[in-house]
Amino acid sequence: MIEDGSSPHPRYITGIGVLALPQLPAGGLPASPVTCLRNVWIELENGAVRRIGPEGESSPAHVKSDECFDAANGLVTPGFVESHTHPVFVLSRQYEFHLRCQGKKYLEIAAEGGGILSSVRGVRGATLPDLTALVRKRFTRFLELGVTTVEAKSGYGLSLKDELNSLKAIRDGAEGLLEVSPTLLAAHTVPPEFKSAPDSYIDLICNEIIPAAAEENLAEAVDIFVEESAFSVAQARRVFEAGSKLGLGIRIHADQFSSSGGASLAAEFGAWSADHMDCTSPDEIDLLAKAGVTIVLLPGAVFFLGLNKFAPARKFIEAGCKVALSTDFNPGTSPTQSLPLMMTLGCNRLKMSPAEALWAVTMGGASALKRQHRIGSLLPGYQADLSLWEAPDIDYLPYAYGDSIPSAVFKKGSLASLKGGLCSGYVMPAD
């Protein structure tokens, strides 16, 4: 058990039973993705890992107790990296779940005005302070669940004002709490006012929304949903060109329900990530591997929609792709914030090993956010983002599905959460 009296700003984490060290990808996911050290300690300095003690030595000699945080012989992992979330929404959508339980399909519900458009109505009717408060509550829960860095998308506003407000809610909701990678997803679906003129909506995105978001430094990347029910490859190309011209990274939702050609476009643009990828063809898998695109797999959405076609994770891994796992947290198709649950689905539905699944929610997620050289591991020099678990080894996290909550979470070396609750007075240290 973790002792509450341990230092909230320690110089050392001692008594580590198992220290999990995800390895940097040479190209794709490493053959041995996680190195585990037993009975070690780590030294922290200025919010980063300074050094790791030798195996078999649970504490350095001659240290003061008030400099230490005792891991109580538990498992220490890097803080998880969430690489695909949609946290800016107002209302839940359990009524859609009820309809799906009666046999309705997701695309049928969306075509009748449900789905994404129902969340759009909520966001457009909310104030920025209300959105910020909702996002902060969700980010707090992520932190309590061991997530120290979150990719967060807009996409339920679908207008200049509401997309910018969504990005501001992401920025302000994360302030002093955790690290965020904001993504502009104005091209999530066609809003009602542009139903008969979707190319005009793409004009608005490229000519007004993307430039405004870039000018205000509200987004790191642009994203688009390429699917028959959403946008075409030609429309995505326009969005990518507009974003790239202003220095924004590229992400894509593709191949969720059908092979759309979006994977090839992601490879062409060297996208930061290609997400969903449940229906990607073998030829396109090879293109993505050669282009170095990180594949973000979202098994929670497949599971929650009651579908049977999960992404071909093993084919991506064998082709040399970097693979991440994410919750796809959103109110309609994956309303969960549990990355350990995604690890479980990664193991028993995507045929990943527990070590591959842990790599996918740490170094894999960091790779999708272009942060793999400072977060996603606890090697010396990496940011001291870490979680402590009452677990004997890394296999236990996906094994104990639905029940994995860290005993303690540190962000930049500062204690943020203890036993599933945010620490009073915690403020994320500034860079």
Image (cartoon, grey):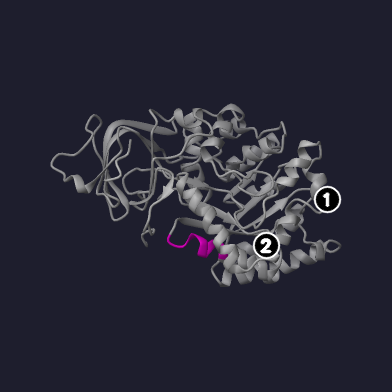
Does residue 412 appear left or right of residue 309 in this picture?
left
Residue nearest the observer in this picture, 417 or 388: 417
Which residue occupies 71% across, 38% down? 305
Q: Position of residue 14 (x, y in %)?
A: 26, 39
Q: Position of residue 420 (x, y in %)?
A: 44, 44
Question: In the displayed image of the protein, which residue is found farthest to the right?
Answer: 196
Image quadrant occupied by the C terminus: bottom left
> In the rendered image, is residue 213 in sight?
yes
- Within 10 Å of disc 1 (Cα), the crowding (few <14, some 14-19, many 20+) is few
Does dot 1 land on a helix, a strand or a loop? helix
Q: Quadrant of residue 395?
A: top left
Does dot 2 land on a helix, a strand or a loop? helix
Where is mark 1, residue-wise? 111
Which residue occupies 46% across, 62% down? 175
Does residue 326 appear left or right of residue 240 in this picture?
left
Upstream in sequence: badge 2 or badge 1: 1
Which residue occupies 47% across, 35% down? 404
Q: Position of residue 254 (x, y in %)?
A: 69, 46
Query: In the image, which residues are magenta?
Result: 169-176
From mark 2 to mark 1, how far is it between C-alphas? 19 Å
Q: Quadrant of residue 241?
A: bottom right
Question: Looking at numbered disc 1 in the image, what kind of residue is underneath it?
Answer: Ala
Residue nearest the observer in this picture, 420 or 371: 420
Where is mark 2, residue-wise? 123
> In the rendered image, is residue 219 in sight?
no
Q: Nearer the viewer, mark 2 or mark 1?
A: 2
Does residue 401 appear left or right of residue 427 in this picture?
right
Q: Which secondary structure dominates the residues rendered in magenta?
A: helix
- Within 10 Å of disc 2 (Cα), the crowding (few <14, some 14-19, many 20+) is many
